[in-house]
Amino acid sequence: MACGARPAGTDSGRCFGCSEAAPGWAAALRPANGLAAAVHVLLGLNAVLAAVVVADDVWADVLLGGLRDGTGDVGPEDFDAVRSMARGVNGIFLPLALATAVVFIVWFHRIRENADLLLPKGHRHGRGWTIGAWFTPVALWFPWQLMVDCWRASAPLDAEGRRSTPSEKILALWWSTWIGSIVLGRIAAATMHHVDPTVLDSLETLRTPLRVETAASALRVVAAVAAITVVTRLTAMQRTRRTEVNPLAARAAQEVRVQALVSPPAAATTPAPTPATTPASAGAPHDGAPQAQAPA
């Protein structure tokens, strides 16, 4: 029982999980609890900000519809609150996005370091890609592969130490909604440049990119919530792998393995020869045994 939690199942005297891990992984693994908490806060703020954008865009779409149809008492001054909200969101968005990106990448790098300890041979890309992949457009799928590899390496172990296969649906949800929000956001921005909001005939055309932007912001909300779930579960899986180790049993098992490696093999011993039985001794009585009387 190398880790003190599961029986040894390999020739090395370790359970299956420990045999796949790097030597001394339990002492080197550093749970990312603090970084995960910071990522949770920043992603939550991103979700709130994206929800505000959704509400602002929906309200702007309603106003544009009323202005185009001439129904209700809608005038240009009604858009002042919408523009004010948009300016406030734009002032917060960039600093928040940068802070979220930096802290998320730092957390991701820590997670990858731990995953390397848990399964050194289970990764398709080097550790440096946890940083560089986000700035390499031609390798847009690398972050997804890196996250999946970390997810599988950190998977819980069964009673014999074999890694389980947790569902990756939450990873697919996070990645697809995040990529979708980026694509829709760029489409909305590109379409908006060709619209003149001062021309009444362009109002309907303006509503199209506005609705696309609303969809992009809604996807950002879902992506942020899914990312929080990914961060929570991945951090918890690695923390559980570390807390399952019994330090005393692990140290005792390590000492036994070291002793077995450094101790010379015991010399084969031959049993001591049994004294030969002589006729005289064969007939000699044993101590304490009754002796037969010789006949007269």
Image: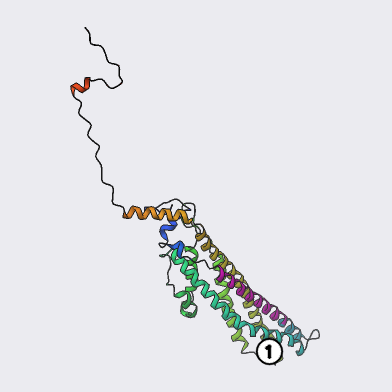
Residue 41: % across, % down: 62, 73
Q: Residue at x 72, y 85 (%)?
A: 82
Left or right of 251? Residue 84 is right
Magenta region's main secondary structure?
Answer: helix
Q: Nearer the viewer, residue 286 or 147?
A: 286
Question: Is 34 a magenta residue?
Answer: yes
Residue that sits furthest to the right in the current view: 73
Report the magenta residues as a range. 30-59
Residue that sits furthest to the left in the current view: 279
Element on which disc 1 rests: helix
Residue 179: % across, % down: 55, 75
Residue 33: % across, % down: 55, 67
Q: Residue at x 60, y 85 (%)?
A: 189
Q: Residues within 10 Å of mark 1 (few under 14, many from 20)?
A: some
Left or right of 267? Residue 30 is right
When the figure is inspected, residue 281 is found, relative to residue 235, above or below; the finding is above
Where is the C terminus found, in terms of image quarters? top left
Q: Quadrant of residue 196?
A: bottom right
Residue 12 appears in the rendering: no
> Which residue carries the number 1 mark?
202
When the figure is inspected, residue 95 is found, relative to residue 9, above or below; the finding is below
Q: Residue at x 50, y 69 (%)?
A: 111
Q: Nearer the viewer, residue 134 or 42?
A: 42
When the figure is inspected, residue 202 is found, relative to residue 116, above or below; the finding is below
Q: Nearer the viewer, residue 194 or 247?
A: 247
Q: Nearer the viewer, residue 293 or 226?
A: 293
Number of numbered labels in the structure image: 1
Left or right of 203? Residue 132 is left
What amino acid type is highlighted by mark number 1?
Ser
Residue 100: % across, % down: 57, 77
